[in-house]
Amino acid sequence: MTGLRNLMKQKKCTGLDETERDIQDLMKQKEMDTYSNNAAERKRALFETMPVGRALATMAVPTIISQLINLIYNMVDAFFIGRTGNSYMMAATTVTLTMVMMNVAFSNLFGVGGGSLVARLMGVQKTDEARRVSAYSVYGAIVLSLVYSTLIGLFMNPVLSFLGASDATLGYARQYTLFVIVIGTLPGILSMVLAHLLRNAGYSGKASLGLSGGGILNIVLDPLFMFVLLPKGHEVEGAAAATLISNVLACIYLLLAYHRACGEAPLSLRLADACRISKGNRRSLYSVGVPSAILTGLFDVANICVNILASAHSDLVLAGMGIVMKVERIPNAVNVGLCQGMLPIVAYNYSSGNENRMHKIIRTARFAGLTVAGISIAALMTFAEPLPRLFLSTSAGDVEAALMTVGYAAVFLRIRCLASPFQFLNYHTSFCMQGMGKGKETMLHAIVRELVFYIPLMFLLDRLFGEYGLASALPAGEACGACFALLLLRHILRKAKSENNP
């Protein structure tokens, strides 16, 4: 009001029109400040006072939808490639899936590491530090993306051969890798990092809309590039080009959404903020981000082992396993989305000392995830026969090879779907530990889960029972990993409770 009175006193000197414009500008600024304050209060209520079930749904539902849509757009490549009836094209996309998952691992380094730290800093009202962490995460992701894509471009053939590509599949794998990894890594990784940062700042809807929009666009562009714009025999190249364009446009939207959110939340795109991050915050970011990246990276290593062992049996076994690895990602996508929605609330309440609310969030998310896992087992068991046919036509191309591939996939699916509840418990525990900033424990869990249990069981059971033993290694390994994870989380929570209540 003092500003308004001063402007009115200057009325005779400046003129009526100019004074009115100044008053309008001042009122607009006041409205913007009020809107920003209201937005901040709404975000704080989400983390602090909103009923647990509603808060979890608010954060998790958009994330789950985003995960499912992105899963669909990853699967749609395989779906349309499967319309050709070419098992070798399908095997090639299975090989390249490993490198796509490495994008996820690298995005977790700065997305999960930076995002969870932003949420914890928000919990103790250190907004300036949160801005520096977010900016550092964005620029770190850009540098890492450029390094990774350059290395893959230089060593593409030996990498693909190591991952299981044969002479029959190498050409197709090169086509996909060029577009999606060599050219597309930067927008792909940056999109996921921006989405993590937005979600952890309370903007789950915006994060999910950006990733989902890219997925929907890819569903539309895939058939256009594969069957209209490019000639027959270039279906893999068409799918890759559609994925690249979708990722670029999704990245542009998320950059704009992130830039707008910077005015309301402790987020930043300023290089100066990135350079001003403290050593302590940088260490905290990597203490969670590195184990999270390693967790996904070890999952990728496990997939490499699956591909190598499956391809040793035949390209058809590899193609069948690739189909199953896509189908089983449906319940995984729901549960990962649930855990990603849970993480910011766990992180915020852990740092603010609201132990009771944190425990309620953990229990609610666990119950929801196990329910999803149980439903998924029943559904995948029931539809184990028809589901693989969605990914590979048995009426086009080499029909005999396609039928054998689908047969393998049906059996593998019935075996591997039993891992669903154990996989969720592993995800849930890992995200809880990441939210609490327990990087060492997260890394320990990742190493034990993959290197102590799953991968050794994979080689042992494959040696004893062939390709069906290889499929059985997943439920066996995940069950052992889940038991270890629950014991580890129980120890962390008891230790935290004793420290808070000496």
Image (spheres, grey):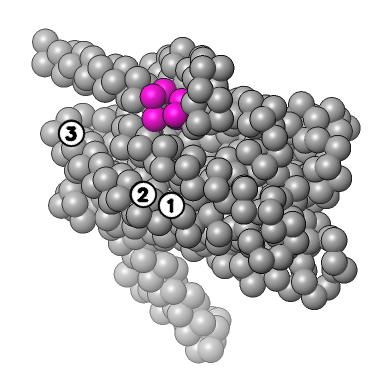
Q: Name the residue under label 3.
A: 359
Instruction: Name the amino acid type tagged 2.
Output: Met
Q: Is residue 394 at all visible to an observer of this figure?
A: yes
468 vs 79, nearest the viewer: 468
Please state, as top left, top right, bottom left or bottom right, where the C terminus lies in the image.
Answer: top left
Among the 4 quarters of the image, the one containing residue 101:
top right
27 vs 249, nearest the viewer: 249
Q: Extreme front residue here?
A: 400
User: N-terminal of the two: label 3 or label 2?
Assistant: 3
Instruction: Name the amino acid type tagged 3.
Output: His
Find numbered disc 1 in the image and state the secondary structure of the residue it sits on: loop
Residue 381's mark? Answer: 2
Predominant secondary structure, magenta span: helix
Q: In the rendered image of this protein, does residue 470 appear above or below residue 464? A: below
Instruction: Name the amino acid type tagged 1.
Output: Ala
The magenta segment: 472-477
